[in-house]
Image (spheres, helix red, strand yellow):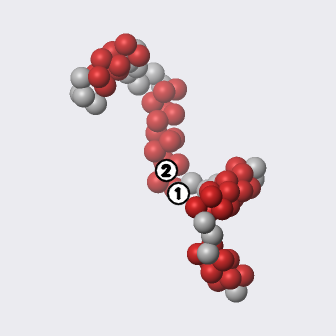
């Protein structure tokens, strides 16, 4: 019931008020790790990436090389 009332109130907010509300919500979520949940698929991807890094299976590029590729629209 509360959520239904909140949705109705949100529809009446102006852009500035919506931005302020969003900031309040994000601050609340970032201060409590229990609010931030990852999907299992995301956890798996992150675990795989960390494993590659920890086992030296990552091919690192230096910034100058990446910058050239970006400026040449190769990425």
Q: Which mark is residue 42?
A: 2
Tell me the residue at 24%/23% (across/down).
Answer: 72
Residue that lies at the very extreme toward the bottom in this rendered image: 1
Q: Is residue 50 above or below residue 61?
A: below
Q: How far is mark 2 from mark 1, CA to CA?
A: 5 Å
Q: Circle 1 is placed at which residue position?
A: 39
Residue sitting nearer the eye, 51 or 39: 39
| Residue 3 pos. (x, y %) | 67, 79
Disc 1 is placed on an element classified as: loop
39 in relation to 9, above or below: above
Q: Are marks 2 and 1 in contact (CB under 8 Å)?
A: yes
Q: Residues within 10 Å of mark 2 (few under 14, many from 20)?
A: few
- State the residue at coordinates (66%, 62%): 17
Query: Circle 2 — which element?
Result: helix
Q: Where residue 65 appears, x then y in whole percent?
A: 33, 15
**Is residue 19 in view?**
yes
Q: In this picture, is 3 found above or below 58?
A: below
Identify the image quadrant of the C terminus. Answer: top left
> Residue 57's x, y, as percent?
41, 25
Front residue of 26/48: it is 26
Image mark for residue 17: none
Image side of residue 37 versus residue 62, left or right: right
Depth check, front residue: 62 or 71: 71
């Amino acid at each position: 019931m509360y959520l239904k009332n909140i949705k109705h109130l949100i529809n009446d907010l102006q852009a500035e008020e919506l931005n302020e509300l969003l900031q309040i919500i994000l601050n609340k979520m970032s201060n409590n790790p229990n609010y931030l949940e990852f999907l299992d698929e995301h956890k798996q991807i992150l675990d795989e990436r960390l494993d590659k890094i920890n086992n030296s299976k990552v091919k690192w590029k230096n910034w100058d090389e990446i910058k050239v590729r970006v400026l040449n629209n190769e990425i």
